[in-house]
Image (spheres, grey):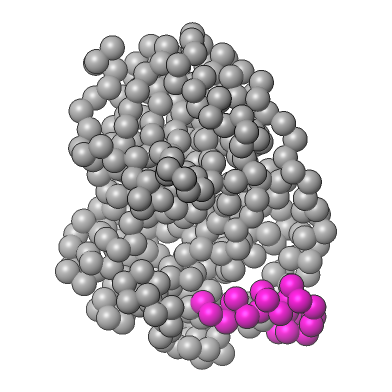
Amino acid sequence: MNDLIPSLVSDGQILAEINGCLGLITLNRPQALNALSLPMIRDITTLLRHWADRPEIQAVAVLGAGREGKPPAFCAGGDIRFFHQAAHAGDPALGDFFTEEYRLNHLIHAYPKPYIALMDGIVMGGGMGISQGAKLRVLSERSKLAMPETGIGLFPDVGGGYFLAQCPGHVGEWLALTGQSIAAGDAIEWGLGDVFVPAAQWDDLVAALKSSPQPSAEHVVATVMERADLAPAADPKAAAERIDRHFGEPSVAGILDSLAAAGDDWARQTHDSLLHRSPTMLAVTLELVRRGRRLSLADDLRLERDLVHQCFHLRGSAEASETVEGIRALAVDKDHAPRWRPARVAEVDPAEVAAFFVSPWPPEAHPLKDLA
């Protein structure tokens, strides 16, 4: 049994256990809402590659460690404080983080065995990256899914340009630009989740996966499905109609004008939300999602690796980076007053937006050149 769990490097931030044919991965950084560190990414990758080659392991489940007396979190994203520190220090581990994270995202989408994501609680950013490629994405009424990166001067990465582009209509643009969180019913309707298990059944589900006999992948899936129920009622079709009316506009300025002209409460709140986000990164994000509809996952991840490099390096210094400034305002100084440059959508230079999409590497030297 011991040889089924390879040595890990994250100092307990990832826990691995085996129950019959099932390999279980627990994100164990609850004080940080199970946000991903580089050692965690490396450990998950090591486990998945090791288990892919072991016939004893027929399925994998990933879940987040709970927080005593607090709402659950599957994974709230990446370690943005690390991004800020590494950018200022010129630490090459920053590039390693994104290269290895995107490789992990690709590995999960292409995984040869059933990979089950138990997405209870907060599922944001990097948490979406390690769940959207799952064969079975399990939600509860506590699940809150979001890609909030434009709020920190970034874009929805970890494959977001690919999986958000597959949402119906212009839901992907709305989720990408606003960072709005959605609940289980909408997520399932829009293709970002598969199965709803009520929170009252969650502890029993996890206990069964960890302790009840799991002799086959089919039995693992049945353990989940026997606890599944209908997700709480939602009206995603009405919401999608409203979203399409505004977020189908060809530009960020057009979307803002459409929302301003509508005058209803939802449109006003959405308009105000967009005005607080990086104008430059709104334009980059809109272009990414629209390109994503024509890209394979591998090509999207290569493009995202280009974009994230430009986020930290295009303007020449950490101090000039929209992403570093956004993280400063949210998580370092916590003044929630980012100084975006430029501050208004009308001032965004189309040439600078286009520059984000120019790869800093020739194809043969791209860090993700071998993704199939």
| 216 and 308: which is toward the camera | 216
Residue 218, position in %: x, y?
57, 15
Q: Is residue 313 left or right of residue 55?
A: left
| Residue 212 versus residue 359 in the image, above or below | above
Residue 304, position in %: x, y?
42, 58
Residue at (47, 45) in percent of width and height: 69
Residue at (44, 33) in percent of width and height: 62
**Which of the 4 image quarters holds residue 228?**
top right
Task: Please provide the residue range marked out in magenta.
Answer: 257-277
Residue 81, position in %: x, y?
30, 63
The image quadrant where one finds the N terminus is: top left
| 88 and 303: which is toward the camera | 88
Count of numbered circles on the image:
0
Residue 68 in view (yes/no): yes
Residue 363 in view (yes/no): no
Task: Confirm whether the magenta stretch covers residue 228.
Answer: no
The image quadrant where one finds the C terminus is: top left
| Residue 86 versus residue 39 in the image, above or below | below
| 139 and 164: which is toward the camera | 139
Q: Is residue 355 left or right of residue 277?
A: left
Residue at (33, 56) in percent of width and height: 79
| Residue 116 versus residue 96 in the image, above or below | above
